[in-house]
Amino acid sequence: MDIIKQISAIPLFQGLAADYNQQIASIVVNKHYQRGQTIFSEGDDGNGFYVVASGRVKVFKLSHEGKEQILHILGTGEPFGEVPVFAGEHFPAHAEAMEETRVLFFPRAAFVELIKKNPSLALNMLAMLSRRLRRFSSLIEDLSLKEVPGRLSAYLLYLSETKSQSINLTLDISKAQLASLLGTIPETLSRILARMSTEELIESDGQRSIKILDRHGLAELASGERRLA
Amino acid sequence: MDIIKQISAIPLFQGLAADYNQQIASIVVNKHYQRGQTIFSEGDDGNGFYVVASGRVKVFKLSHEGKEQILHILGTGEPFGEVPVFAGEHFPAHAEAMEETRVLFFPRAAFVELIKKNPSLALNMLAMLSRRLRRFSSLIEDLSLKEVPGRLSAYLLYLSETKSQSINLTLDISKAQLASLLGTIPETLSRILARMSTEELIESDGQRSIKILDRHGLAELASGERRLA
DNA sequence: AATCCACCTTGACTTAGGTCAAACATCAGT
DNA sequence: ACTGATGTTTGACCTAAGTCAAGGTGGATT
């Protein structure tokens, strides 16, 4: 099988002794989901964790009224659902396939054994969780201390710095999903994009492409130095 | 020194081979802070992490206008500032002593070596970070999907379940700090406590003691099934 | 080209909770 | 007992962003 090939491409498993990939492959289970299908629900028992093999997965919280807050969106090679592996108990959030998705599932007990034997893997996992904590800190900061225009600006700048490196951005998710990621609703997002356009910070075609006109202005919005009129 | 004694009382270091405490002790540095003193600031280089030996520490984010959001409050035996040890870069938040506080500081390089040699320590650390991720998920959920009365109810129930096991609670922090922990401001907190009192969910003496009158009602508020009038 | 569907936008309205300002309470230290 | 620091409460006001409802857009399907 090319499962070994897939595994060796996962960042989490980089820098391991070669024969470990074989061991990892022996404990892994392949799973397949359609768009919109639930992978796990908040409160489920977490008896292992997942890595996206292809497609995309969102991890999110749901309010009593059904509003959703996306915690993260994961693409190929990214792990999710690790919390219960180490802290025990249930999954703290829901996970759902955003498109047709294949995932690799690593049963808990076998994986913990692997970690015990392999300090490199342990350190990779620690780095992974630490990065996630950093991102969560930043999300908490945004939700508590910034307004929606600031959060949106930060997201646009993040997009332009990582994915495209350019001034012409293409959103890789729907605006409704972006709203949920930013902790707001589509209507509010739409209005703020409109305001940013009239202030000539961006140019939006109403589709998924956005052009950054004033990077500095966006940075000021993101930091809270400036506000929209 | 009784540093070894202190170290063996730290949950993070439980379940390790006995001689490791000696090794840990050899890399640790003792530090001392007064109330209000900064331990580190967001953006500082993180060249190690800390464990509270005595006193209390708050870890928080600050907005551009100076509003603060507390991420966690740490007491004796609890570690903080671990993110940069494993994910590199700077501290993602500020840390400050809330009272006279002693901390143990673990320099990064030496600690990473220790982890590599000790799978138990690695797993303890993974459990620690996972628990923190769980708490952050819950904070994100609260900030994004719940109103202040819901967050406060959840906090009061949490207090009564963990610390006192009873119906008579004593806040261990000022109401201003509690507001910052819940992602609101003292005025709002004060008004909501007043409303909860008139609805006979709690009895508040205006000091730091609060009596739970209607646990079920609080639980409904916390889950979002009910709202204050 | 007509229909459908998912997605996006706009307008009118409401509201949770923040801001500002003032007064009040508590407690430690001189 | 007085002073000052620290924390709490209350009132009047404001605003960011949510709700509800209607309409618009564009791509895909038949």
Image: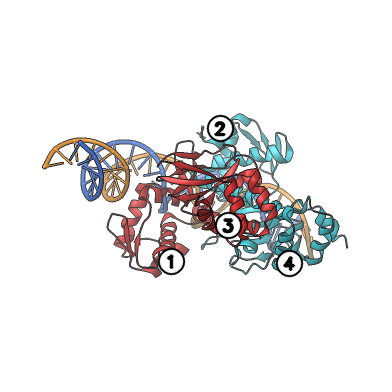
Chain colours: A red, B cyan, C orange, D blue
Mark found first going from the N terminus, 2 or 4: 4
Task: Report if residue A159 is visible in the image.
Answer: yes
Which residue is more in the foreground, D26 or A53? A53
Picture coordinates of residue A77 (x, y %)?
A: 50, 54
Q: Residue drawn 46% across and 42% down?
A: A32
Badge 3 amino acid: Phe
Q: Which residue is mark 4?
A: B110
Q: Specify whether disc 1 shares its chain with disc 3.
A: yes
Q: At numbered mark 1, what does the secondary structure look like: helix, strand or loop?
A: helix
**Judging from the image, what secondary structure is the residue with disc 2 in?**
helix
Q: Which residue is mark 1?
A: A161
Q: Please, what secondary structure does the residue beneath circle 4 have?
A: helix
Label 2: chain letter: B
* Circle 2 residue: B220
Marks 3 and 4 sit apart, C-alpha to C-alpha, by 23 Å
**For residue A147, side relative to residue B122 (left or right):** left
Q: Are marks 2 and 4 in contact (CB under 8 Å)?
A: no
> What chain does badge 4 belong to?
B
Circle 3 Cα neighbour tier, 10 Å, few/some/many (<14 / 14–19 / ≥20): some
Graded by Cα atoms within 10 Å as few (under 14), some (14 to 19) or many (20 or more), the crowding at tag 2 reads: some
